[in-house]
Image: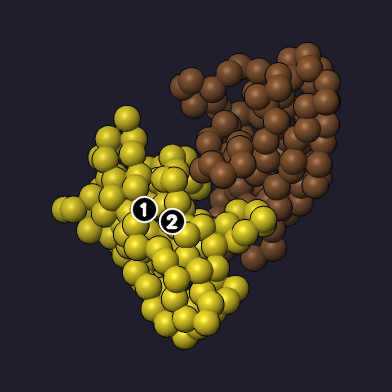
Chain colours: A brown, B yellow
Amino acid sequence: QSALTQPASVSGSPGQSITISCTGTSSDVGSYNLVSWYQQHPGKAPKLMIYEVSKRPSGVSNRFSGSKSGNTASLTISGLQAEDEADYYCCSYAGSSTLVVFGGGTKLTVL
Amino acid sequence: EVQLVESGGGLVQPGGSLRLSCAASGFTFSSYWMSWVRQAPGKGLEWVANIKQDGSEKYYVDSVKGRFTISRDNAKNSLYLQMNSLRAEDTAVYYCASGGKIQPTPRYWGQGTLVTVSS
């Protein structure tokens, strides 16, 4: 039950775009289009930003987008805003034994 | 509006037990996978357990197998986590989360309840 691999931190200036990667294996990210991304502000519960690789829940800004290539999923945030500063976690379905696995999280700093 | 409200957290001694509850509203509870996810202080999210809509399938992270039991009562729109033989490393905020109809990855989250295991 190994965690997915995310960079510990990324940063960008307001208005710029950033991408956070999430690397798994052929048993999780690579096998299923069931990758989700969550945003978590300090002291708050996680919030779903992307599900099933690239789908956005109602109410989530279209500045957030997701994609996948092979065993790596990515979250892109365009037009960075100060309120985007938060921790971001990826999550993938991992089959019938492990079921769900999370990434270690990425701290996004808006400079 | 989907609402998930956890309760039952608190301070417990190592080796002790605690039962967490999650009251769900705003959606058809019996139609969705449900999860418990925890977050140790200053750490990332860790999936703990999942349960299928009818309770027929349950899955656990290795570190809690044999100690934690996930269950649900669809008549009461409630999810539970019975935690036995608690250890210091179980100290975390425990979140209840609803999944999808077909797949179990979390979508909506509660605000969490803090469990502290300490003597």
Of callouts 1 and 2, the N-terminal one: 1
**Residue occupying image coordinates x 33% and y 39%:** B3
- Locate residue B83: give its quadrant: bottom left
What is the quadrant of residue A55 in the picture?
A: top right
Cβ–Cβ below 8 Å for labels 1 and 2? yes
Question: In the figure, is residue A7 to the left or right of B91?
Answer: right
Amino acid bearing label 2: Thr
Is residue B75 rendered to the left or right of residue A62?
A: left
Q: Is residue B49 visible?
A: yes
Of the residues shown, which amino acid type is indicated by label 1?
Glu
* Quadrant assignment for the C terminus of chain A: top right
Residue drawn at 68 percent across, 51 percent down = A103
Q: In which quarter of the image is the N terminus of chain A?
A: bottom right
Residue lying at the far front in this picture: please name it: B119
- Residue B63 spot, x, y in % from top left: 57, 74
Residue A60 figure quarter:
top right
According to the image, label 2 marks what residue? B113
Name the residue rendered at 75%, 35% in the picture.
Answer: A108
Residue at disc 2, secondary structure = strand
Vertical side of A96 occupied by A86: above or below: above
Label 2 crowding class (10 Å Cα cut-off): few <14, some 14-19, many 20+?
many
Circle 1 SS class:
strand
> Residue at label 1?
B6
Residue A50, position in %: x, y? 58, 32
Going by the picture, which residue comes out furthest to the left?
Answer: B75
